């Protein structure tokens, strides 16, 4: 493949000579454009040495040789890969600004574009950056999810440039997310609930909301109209998603039951309390008044069971099963007990998946006994796989049976 590598000015630019070398090892021809800021982090000479081509750093090129021919370059390149893609370059691409060699080339390029954003998590989560990425993804530009780990600034978080193998695997796959959920309405729940004990104390759980938010973001990117009913979490809501914020299990129940009849599918990723204090003290429980005290808990509303029994009911209802042992059998039992169409089981005793982790590993159980095991992957990838199965069920239900076709 002819790969035009665009390098913009982030610290991760220093990794690009290795990326170029590995791209060439994988059989690709690589030409490179560096922004002026990228040249602060990596020398054009080191990239030229490994790519066996000159490196473009100036929009105007060498006037004595006729400058840079963007159109000729665009004819040559099969793919424009920008790694690392900084907030500035992402913004230029989203708005069509063409004021340097890379952004000018991007406007001339007609083929596939892949971005590998890399920056500090605060920047990555900024509404402008997320909005610009969303604009680009809606145009069909592929965005490789940044890695999580130690960042150049010393912070821990999301924003690292993925390893060259991940970037090259994406380049070599043609697995582009399409808008196959257009016209579908999906309600997704996310996060924990908080069950009040008194005005200052509550009972909750370790859910961060990441799984549900990943589902909402993925569904929205695929064109679905998404409502996210969210418990209290600290992550920013996805763009173009209606968010209904709730606190307790009973508030989540009211929101879900009110909105569900109009939905094609509901996915319950929230970690809803199973029990709630029977009596909530109206004033702060004073420690001096008790040597010990106990709280009576009663069952919280079982939202997903109520939802599955609604008439009319959403076409597809998906429950999660948070288990610490015997995952598959417990997921199968929940499918039957709750009357849902799919159950996504995950092991919440592990620290590398499940609660408050960027990754998950799940088993998806269907009514027909089908069982899909998904190895450890980002919650975003798991979300897409769950949506694939949800969409397949919706399609089955929308396809009229043979009897319905028979007339007279
Ligand atoms: O939020 P993260 O940090 O990303 O973590 C993700 C997750 C671990 C929370 C998620 O993947 C998950 O497993 N969510 C379901 C958690 C849960 O409550 O599981 P459960 O097995 O206790 O409940 C089964 C199903 O019934 C779930 O779909 C749940 O939403 C639903 N439920 C539970 C209790 C209740 N009162 N009403 C419900 O509808």
Image (cartoon, rainbow, N blue to C red):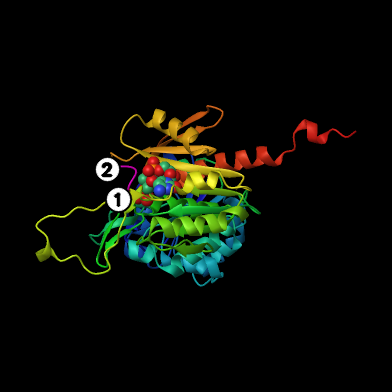
Q: Is residue 13 visible?
A: yes
Q: Which residue is mark 2?
A: 351
Q: Is residue 250 left or right of residue 283?
A: right
The answer to whether 245 is drawn above or below residue 184 in the figure is below
Residue shown at 37% from the left, 66% from the top: 123
Q: Is residue 354 magenta?
A: yes
Identify the image quadrant of residue 405.
top right
Q: Counting other residues with Cα less than 10 Å from the Cα at mark 2, is it few (<14), some (14-19), or many (20 or more)?
A: few
Position of the C terminus, as image quadrant, is top right
Q: Which residue is mark 1?
A: 297
Label 2 secondary element: loop
Task: Where is residue 237? Give x, y as percent.
Answer: 44, 62
Task: Where is residue 191? Give x, y as percent.
Answer: 38, 54
Task: Where is residue 10? Give x, y as percent.
Answer: 35, 62
Residue shown at 24% from the left, 69% from the top: 283
Nearer-N-terminus badge (2/1): 1
- Looking at the picture, tell me which residue is in the foreground, 284 or 382: 284
Q: Is residue 59 visible?
A: no
- Looking at the picture, tell me which residue is in the foreground, 159 or 126: 126
Label 1 secondary element: strand
- Label disc, if present, on residue 379 of the rendered structure: none
Q: Nearer the viewer, mark 2 or mark 1?
A: 1
Mark-to-mark CA distance, 2 and 1: 28 Å
Q: Which residues are magenta?
A: 351-355
Position of the N terminus, as image quadrant, is top right
The answer to whether 125 is drawn above or below residue 48 in the figure is below
Residue shown at 42% from the left, 66% from the top: 87
> How many numbered marks does the figure carry?
2
């Amino acid at each position: 493949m002819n790969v035009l590598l665009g390098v913009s000015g982030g610290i991760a630019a220093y990794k690009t000579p290795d990326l170029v070398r590995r791209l060439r090892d994988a059989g690709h021809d690589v030409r490179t454009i560096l922004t002026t800021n990228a040249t602060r982090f990596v020398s054009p000479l080191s990239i030229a040495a490994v790519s066996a081509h000159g490196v473009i750093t100036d929009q105007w090129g060498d006037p004595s040789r006729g400058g840079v021919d963007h159109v000729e370059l665009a004819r040559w390149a099969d793919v424009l890969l920008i790694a690392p893609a900084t907030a500035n370059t992402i913004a230029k691409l989203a708005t069509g600004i063409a004021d340097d060699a890379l952004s000018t080339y991007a406007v001339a390029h007609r083929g596939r574009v892949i971005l590998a954003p890399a920056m500090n998590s605060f920047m990555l989560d900024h509404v402008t950056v997320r909005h610009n990425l969303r604009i680009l993804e809606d145009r069909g530009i592929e965005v490789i999810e940044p890695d999580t780990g130690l960042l150049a600034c010393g912070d821990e978080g999301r924003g690292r440039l993925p390893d060259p193998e991940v970037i090259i695997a994406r380049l070599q796959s043609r697995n582009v997310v399409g808008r196959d959920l257009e016209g579908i309405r999906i309600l997704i729940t996310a996060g924990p609930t908080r069950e009040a004990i008194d005005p200052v104390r509550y009972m909750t759980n370790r859910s961060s909301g990441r799984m549900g938010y990943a589902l909402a973001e993925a569904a929205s990117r695929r064109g679905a109209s998404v409502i996210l009913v969210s418990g209290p979490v600290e992550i920013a809501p996805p763009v173009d998603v209606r968010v209904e914020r709730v606190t307790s299990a009973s508030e989540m129940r009211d929101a879900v039951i009110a909105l569900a009849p109009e939905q094609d599918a509901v996915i319950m990723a929230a970690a809803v309390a199973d029990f709630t204090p029977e009596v909530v003290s109206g004033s702060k429980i004073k420690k001096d008044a008790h040597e010990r005290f106990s709280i009576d808990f009663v069952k919280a509303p079982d939202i997903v069971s109520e939802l599955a029994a609604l008439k009319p009911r959403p076409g597809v209802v998906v429950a999660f099963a948070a288990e610490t042992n015997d995952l598959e059998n417990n997921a199968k039992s929940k499918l039957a007990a709750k009357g849902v169409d799919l159950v996504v089981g995950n092991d919440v005793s592990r620290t590398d998946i499940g609660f408050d982790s960027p990754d998950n590993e799940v088993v998806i159980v269907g009514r027909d006994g089908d069982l899909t095991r998904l190895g450890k992957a980002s919650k975003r990838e798991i979300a897409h796989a769950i949506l694939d199965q949800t969409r397949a069920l919706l399609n089955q239900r929308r396809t009229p049976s043979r009897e319905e076709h028979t007339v007279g």
